[in-house]
Image (cartoon, coloured by chain):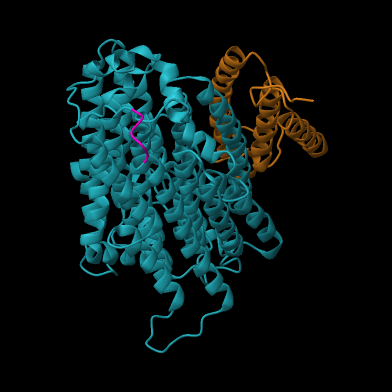
Amino acid sequence: MELVLSLGIGIMTGSGVWLLLRPRTYQVIIGLSLLSYAVNLFIFGVGGLKVNAPAILREGAEISTFADPVPQALVLTAIVISFATTALFLVVLLASRGLTGTDHVDGREQSK
Amino acid sequence: MNLGQHLIVAPILIPLVVGALLLLLDERQRFAKAMIGLASTIALFAVALALFRFAGDIDGPETAREGVYLLGNWAAPFGIVLVVDRLSALMLVLAATLAIPALVYALARWHTAGTHFHSLYQFLLMGLNGAFLTGDLFNLFVFFEVMLAASYGLLLHGSGLLRVKAGLHYIAINLAAALLFLIGVSLIYGVTGTLNMADLAVRAATVGPEQRMLLEAGAGILGVAFLIKAGMWPLNFWLPPAYTAASAPVAGIFAILSKVGVYVVLRLSLLVFGEGSSPSAGFGLEVLLIGGVATMIFGAIGVLASQALGHLAGFSVLVSSGTLLTAIGMSGSGITTGALFYLVSSTLTISAFFMLIELVERGQDAGASVLAVTMEVYGDADADDEIEEGGDGVALPGTMAVLGTCFAACGILLAGLPPLSGFVAKFAILSAMLDPIGGDSPATVAPHIWFIIFIIIFSGLSALIAMTRSGIRTFWASMEGTEPRVLVIEVAPVLLLILATLFLTVQAGPVMRYMDATARALATPHQYIDAVLDARRAGPSGAEVPQ
């Protein structure tokens, strides 16, 4: 499972960074989304990987059978925030497309 | 827990509630919105002053007091906390001092240029205050995002092609930086198991050698996120276009945004990697030093190369950030004292300068970038009719004389010449660099220190050259452009900020003592750590503090 998770994070980060550096706004926003997925998984992985472990403590149970609740709370917050900011970015992207007539990040096509 | 203690959370709650309330008001009720926003900002200033007096009640530099507020009433490492100490109180006052003039300036005309200006403004203040007050890394992230989300909206305020283009880059960069922030925070959490800054400072000292590399990597990634915000070279190419494109009052309050990055770097580097605390003591200081010097050089060249005044101001932000980062990188209590003074002085200056630029450029022919944006918003013909809307439309007599005086004052402040506070700030930094121990014997000064001193003076000189050049072009040029119609309500904020720097100069003694106490409290963070970790819970169960 560690391998799958780390591969997933790695592939998503790699694709995200590549897309982020592309000249089209749509590619940039997809890149940012992929990166934020990768980061969310990364935060999740920081707490240690456990299957079927509850995050809410019960009285008298062995502590090691529980998952770390803090990264889960962090991920939740991070998802909400990145969702909101990506939506905002999308609006700016559309405004830029409407004002400049091109989807290049600099607002004008590269002259060849 | 009495009412006074709840004052700590007020700088976050007031703008939150007011900002949300303003959303409910219809956009046509501009006057009501403006007054509510102004009242909230003034209340924030009062609260900030009260907290400032609480934290800085100077009996002696050693008796610094920290106010710790347990949100949710959980003891410190488990629950989240707000902490007010001298540094955060200082930053709160600075933010509120900028917020009032910038808002008043906006009331003249800018707040009508788009929707929800006042709500966004309040949310920006909430994010700022929260970032200064929080004692917890993840909440720092949340408040950073609140601040940034509001700043995206404010940057786009007034719309126009230029703003949307600059805004696109600004948002993309900051979203990427936010992701770095998250990676850094989670790495640190993974190693130390805590997000509380005070607890982190304790645990960082006990991290084993095999985990230490991971901790330092986390801190480094976190640092990159802050340095992007602070505008360290080579992470700062986004900054001048974004700040230039923003409308004048927005740029005026943006002057403090880059200082948030500097604030966090200062706080965390001294708290977690302070001298003698752990094997990683002094981690990253070389990067700050070299990066700071590079930023200063880049900023100074940019200032010299700027054709438009807006760019000049944008690059001045970089020079200011560079000087501060260099000073933090040099890490000495005396230098930090000067740096704090410089932080306050340069933030006030740059804010005043950004607002002044729009007034000055209003008189010039179209082509000046800021004016072009203005024209786009209002259309050429009715540019002057719009003014009637913003409260009392009293035009200023002797416009050019007043503007010219303000411009000269800004030039003197940016260059760091006497008699204004820019000089005091730079003098404090330079004298601390030349004499780090504070003894009478002439200490030998290392060559690299001389180089840094040269760069600091060079950056001041470049500001002077650039300001003189554009001043001559603007004020001594032939009077072909019409005299700009400038309202009293627009010049008053600029004058107010310049008066604030004058106040800093006149009161340099007490202010410097405060800064000195702050710097010393930062250099010995155990008091901060103890205050946070020993904070008592409120209520009936307050007696037993769980460890």
Taking the image as shown, residue B72 lies to the left or right of residue B183, namely left
Q: Position of residue B204 (x, y in %)?
A: 56, 60
Q: Is residue B238 above or below residue B501?
A: above
Choose top left, top right, bottom left or bottom right for residue A30.
top right
Q: Is residue B384 above or below residue B202?
A: above
Task: Give the color of chain A as drawn.
Answer: orange
Which residue is found at the position 31% from the left and 12% from the top?
Answer: B27
> Looking at this view, is B291 or B380 the one in front?
B380
Q: Position of residue B457 (x, y in %)?
A: 46, 64
Which residue is found at the position 40% from the left and 13% from the top?
Answer: B379
Choose top left, top right, bottom left or bottom right for residue A96.
top right
The quadrant in which the N terminus of chain B is found is top left
Residue bounds of the magenta highlight: B477-481
- Magenta highlight on residue B178: no
Q: Position of residue B537 (x, y in %)?
A: 32, 47
Give the chain ID for the cyan colour.
Answer: B
Q: Is residue B251 above or below residue B304?
A: above
* Residue A60 visible (yes or no): yes
Prevailing secondary structure class for the magenta stretch in the rendered image: loop
